[in-house]
Image (cartoon, helix red, strand yellow):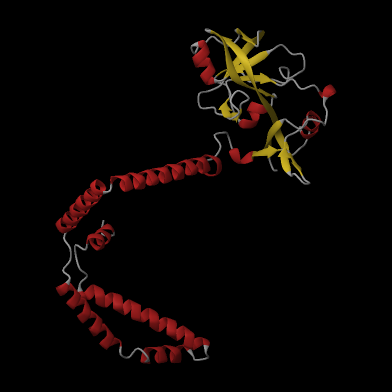
Amino acid sequence: MPRIRPGIARLFRLRPRSDEDLARELDEEIEAHVALRAAQLEERGLSTEEAHAEARRRFDSEGDAKRALLAAARARRETHPPRRLGRVMDDLRQDVRLWLRRIRRQPAFSATACLTLSLGIGATTAIFSVIDSILLEPLPYHDPGRLVSVGHEVTGDDPQTVGLSTGAYFVYRESDAFEHLAVYATDGLNLSGAEGPVRVSATSVNHAFFPALGTVPLLGRGFTEADDEPGASPVVILGHGAWRRLFGADLDIVGQTVLVNALEAEVVGVLPADFRFEARSPLRGVEAETELWLPFGLDPARARNINFSLQAFARLAPGV
């Protein structure tokens, strides 16, 4: 509390500094100048004792300076008495009344100024929110510092970053640098719930996707290597929102059969409510939360290095 009161007093000028406070501050200021001058004289070859003596000699008139400054401070206090809190509030009320009168006299200008301020504050808030979510706030996954994006840099006249081909995926997943290599691709599919088929944002992933993020389903299980094999029985994992919205948060949903694009698939899991993974949705062309998850079922026999459209990320192996 003692550290706060001087700051408040200076803000509202409730209490002037005493002669003792001012004298102490002046002594500290003069000593700082003496030390600085002595250091400069030492650099020119004088000894420490000689430098301090010479610097002190050049400030022999410090007593006269202190007396003059103290006299000036007293004169200012007499001509400019400290403002009390009540006077500060009176000044504030007068400023508010003046501001309101100006608004009434120039409503168009005032509305334009308020609109400009509102747009500026809104734009600044929106930009900060994006920067905070992308750069400052950590990813909502287990040990996000171990997650890396995986792709290819294309050089030339039109440099860009592309994803992986199926051939590259099967090569990179054998790398010792990755504990898990995850690939995914988004699509829009029809999911039949209690009220009939609904178009949802879907993402196909490999079996390493959820382990790479450290995500454990709320109900059921994640995808296994067997689910990810070509020709495996169709299975799906429901996003938490789709589970509640389309299936009424049915706790017995795991093991039931749903229709995905009119094809039967078994529900093997439901993701927790706090899981978020946004990918570009073909339904809206913008980033959207996935509501349905399917195994990729990539076939090594059909792997090619032609279409580099697989989005990929990886969790680094321990020690990498």
Task: Choose between 191 and 102: the one closer to the eye.
Answer: 102
Residue shown at the point (71%, 21%) measured from the top left: 296
Residue shown at the point (34%, 81%) measured from the top left: 30
Up/down of 305 relative to 77, above or below? above
- Residue 242 is left or right of residue 180, and the answer is left
User: Dividing the picture into quarters, in which one does residue 317 lie?
Assistant: top right
Task: Choose between 257 and 54: the one closer to the eye.
Answer: 257
Furthest residue to the right?
A: 301
Up/down of 36 relative to 155, above or below? below
Counting from the top left corner in percent of width and height, residue 269 is at 59, 16
Counting from the top left corner in percent of width and height, residue 236 is at 64, 16
Counting from the top left corner in percent of width and height, residue 190 is at 61, 13
Residue shown at the point (20%, 72%) measured from the top left: 18
Task: Choose between 158 and 314: the one closer to the eye.
Answer: 158
Up/down of 173 relative to 98, above or below? above
User: Dividing the picture into quarters, in which one does residue 199 lie?
Assistant: top right
Counting from the top left corner in percent of width and height, residue 117 is at 38, 46
